[in-house]
Amino acid sequence: MIPKPGEGIPAFLWVMNFPLLEFNEQDQRYYACHHPFTSPRPEFLDDFIAGRNLDRIEAAAYDMVLNGVEIGGGSLRIHREDVQAAMFRAIGLSQAEAAEKFGFFLEALQYGTPPHGGIAFGVDRIAAMLCGTGPIRDVIAFPKTQKGHCLMSESPSRVTGEQLRDLGIAVTADAAGGGKQ
């Protein structure tokens, strides 16, 4: 929680130099610590592309922390085809599997993508801290239950047959769970 006036000042912290990959002993392979589209930091590119020292490579990722609570995070994305291919190799995807799952993306990278990235701040988390409330749910305009239902708008709700017809949707017994509606 943010300290009240007179109790101290807010303490912000940038967290950087995350590992890019983590080796899983059980699976005997690397996994992306953030996601497989996070770029390695520039000083690690040569080793990364060559597949060397994978356990020492740092990600171009960052988090903003306020008084011990993460309030935002982000990264620079991979924007080169050779680096993305190296990532897929590092996490154990064969060239054929990478092409099957992400071929469209690897091909697009061949045409040039500018360096890009961003950060996402948890506005609801920051609002909860500023309000001095506990759960984030207390400051979200339309909080959902654990099952994804909105108590304020009572959604999702059943749709009428007329609404389905308007959308050109037909419900079959298989799609409706064995005929149950």
Image (cartoon, grey):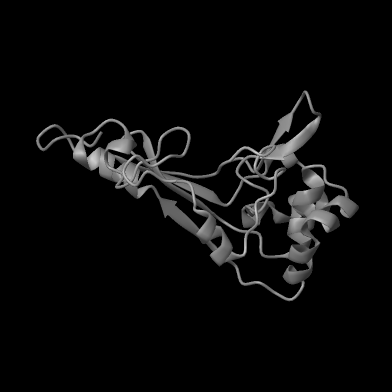
Left or right of residue 1: residue 47: right
Residue 10 visible somewhere in the drawing: no
User: To which quarter of the image does residue 145 belong?
Assistant: top left
The residue nearer to you, when weighing 96 against 54, is: 96
Q: Residue furthest left?
A: 6
Q: Residue furthest bottom?
A: 111
User: To which quarter of the image does residue 76 belong?
Assistant: bottom right
Q: Which residue is painted at 81% across and 62% down in the image?
A: 103
- Residue 132 x/y as whole percent: 21, 35
Q: Which residue is painted at 77% across and 65% down in the image?
A: 104
How many numbered markers are drawn?
A: 0
- Residue 29 x/y as whole percent: 79, 34
Left or right of residue 171: residue 47: right
- Residue 4 x/y as whole percent: 14, 35
Q: Residue furthest right?
A: 96
Q: Quadrant of the N terminus?
A: top left
Q: Quadrant of the C terminus?
A: top right
Q: Which residue is painted at 63% across and 40% down in the image?
A: 33
- Residue 46 x/y as whole percent: 75, 55
Left or right of residue 166: residue 155: left
Q: Which residue is painted at 33% across and 37% down in the image?
A: 137
